[in-house]
Amino acid sequence: MSAVGIAGGSPADLVVTGCAVLVHDDAERIGFREDAAIVVRDGAIDAVTTAAAARDVPAVTRIEAFGQVALPGLINCHTHAPMVALRGLAEDLPTEQWFNDVVWPVETNLTERDVALGARLACAEMIRGGVTCFADHYFHMDAVADVVAECGLRAHLGQVYFSGQGPRGREASLEFALRRRGAADGRVTTALAPHAPYTVTDADLTATAVLARAHGLPVHIHAAENRDQTETSLARHGRTPIEILDRAGLLDTDLLIAHGTGILERDLPLLERTGGRTAVATAPRGYLKFAWPTTTPVRALRAAGVPVGLATDGAASNNSLDVWEAMALTSLIQKSAEGDPRWLTARQALHHATSQSARAVGLGDRIGSLAPGRRADIVLVDLTGPHTQPVHDLAATLVHSARAADVRTTIVDGRVLMRDRVLLTLDVEDVVRELTRRLPGLTARGHGRRVQEYDT
C-alpha cells in the first residue's frame, strides 16, 4: 500500500514504526519484514508497510520501536489463571499427592474474591510477558471474565465441572458459556469445560457433546494428560482417554485437549478424522516438574493435521505463566524426544506460538498473525540487550535468547495495555496486598475436604 493510501481518511488510532515485523506467507511460513510499520484502525491492523510509507500517516498514538521486533501477541492455550495464588504451595510432589494432599483440598476454600484477585495477578503477569490471549478452565469464571473486561486482554473461558457435582455442574458450565460469550467487546469467547475423562462420566461427556453441538460451543478438557492416565484407562475401560472422547462424540465438536502426553499411536487416526476442530495444548514445564516420562507428541499430531498450541498450565504446577519459556522448552524437549536436532526449529516454534495457538483456541481467523484485517494484538520485543546481541538468526534469537522481560509493549485490539514495561490497566501492588491478607484462609487444609479424588 502506498503512503498516500495509508494516509487517506481519518488519523490512524495507532502506528508502530521502525521495527522488524514477524509475518506469515501463504503457507504459514515465518519471515521478518525489516524497517517496517503497522497501522491500526478500529482495533484491527489496517496495513503492514514500510517505516518510510508510514512516516506521514497521522495517528492518535505513535510508537517508535527501533531495535524491537513486532510479533503477534502470544497465546496461552491452557491455564488456570487464578492458581497463581497457589504458586509454590505444592512443590516436588508426584501428581497424585499434588492433587490429593494440597491442590484439591485448598481449592475447596476458593471464593469468588480469591479467584478475582488471582486472575488480576495472572493477567498482569501475562501482559508483562507478551501474552494477549489465554484459554482458562477454572471455577468462578464470571470473576475471571470481569477481570478480562477490565484489563483489556482476550480470553477463551470455560467453567470447569466434575460429575461429582451432579447435573448442576454441567448446567452451570453451559449457563456461563452462553451468558458470557462475546463479552468484553468480543474479546471473550467461551467453552464447555468438563474436567477430564477420569472425573467426568461417559454419560456426562456424551451430554456435553450434545450440548456443544446444540449451542455451537467448543469444549475444553484435560485428556490423556500423562501415560499413567492412559494405561489406567486401558486397564479399567479397555479404551484410551482419546477413545473415550471419541465414543462420547466429543471428537465431532470443536475440542481443545490439554496436555496429551499420554496420546498413543492408536489414537492418531481418530484425531486425524475428527468431525470438528480438534487441537492440543502443550505445557512442557509442568511435565518436567512432575517427571512424566513422555511429552506431547507434537510431530505426530502435526502430521495428523492436529494444531498444537503452547501453554503454561496453572502456576501451581508450572510456577509461571511464561509462554516465552514454553516456546523455548517445546523446541528443546521435542528435539530430545525425537532424537533429531532439526526438529523443532526456532521457526517452527514461532509457528506454534502464533498461528497454531490461534487455531487451537478457535481464533485462527482473527489473531495469530500480523496482517490487514486481523485484530491488532501485538507485542514489541526489545533485542538491544547483551543477551540478544549479535543477531545472526532472528528466529533463533527470539526463541532461545529473548525472555519475557524483553517484551516492552503489549497491545490488544489496538489498545496499549503495557508501554515501556509500565502496566496501564492493572494495579499489581493493591492486588498483592489484598491477596496476601487472604492467603491463610485460602491455603488451609485442616478441614479434610477435597474437590475430587485423583486415583488414576
Image (tube, rainbow, N blue to C red):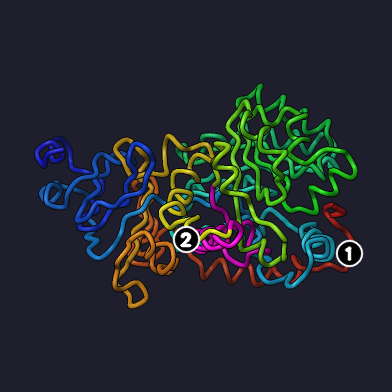
Residue 336 shown in magenta: yes
Mark 1 residue type? His
* Label 1, label 2: how far apart the Cα atoms are: 34 Å
Mark 2 residue type? Leu
Residue 308 appears in which quarter of the rendering?
top right
**In this view of the protein, which residue sits in the foreground, 403 or 128?**
403
Residue 354 shown in magenta: no
- Where are the magenta residues, as a range? 309-338
Q: Compared to 452, does 240 lie above or below? A: above
Residue pictured at 22% horizontal, 49% vertical? 60
Residue pictured at 74% horizontal, 69% vertical? 90
Residue 156 appears in which quarter of the rendering?
top right
> Could you tell me if the residues under marks 1 and 2 are in contact, i.e. CB atoms within 8 Å?
no
Residue pictured at 72% horizontal, 71% vertical? 89
Of the numbered discs 1 and 2, the one sitting upstream in the chain is 2
Which residue is tagged 2?
426
Residue pictured at 51% horizontal, 64% vertical? 325
Q: Do we see residue 124 in this rendering?
A: no
* Helix, strand or loop for the magenta stretch, by majority: helix
Return the x and y of residue 372 as percentages of the image width and height.
29, 37
Q: Do we see residue 362 in this rendering?
A: yes
**In this view of the protein, which residue sits in the foreground, 249 or 134?**
249
Question: What is the total number of numbered labels drawn onto the structure image?
Answer: 2
Quarter of the figure that contains the N terminus:
top left
Return the x and y of residue 256 as percentages of the image width and height.
62, 40
| Res 447 label | 1
| Residue located farthest toward the bottom when viewing the structure as drawn | 386
Quick check: 30 left or right of 172?
Answer: left
Return the x and y of residue 39 as percentages of the image width and height.
24, 45
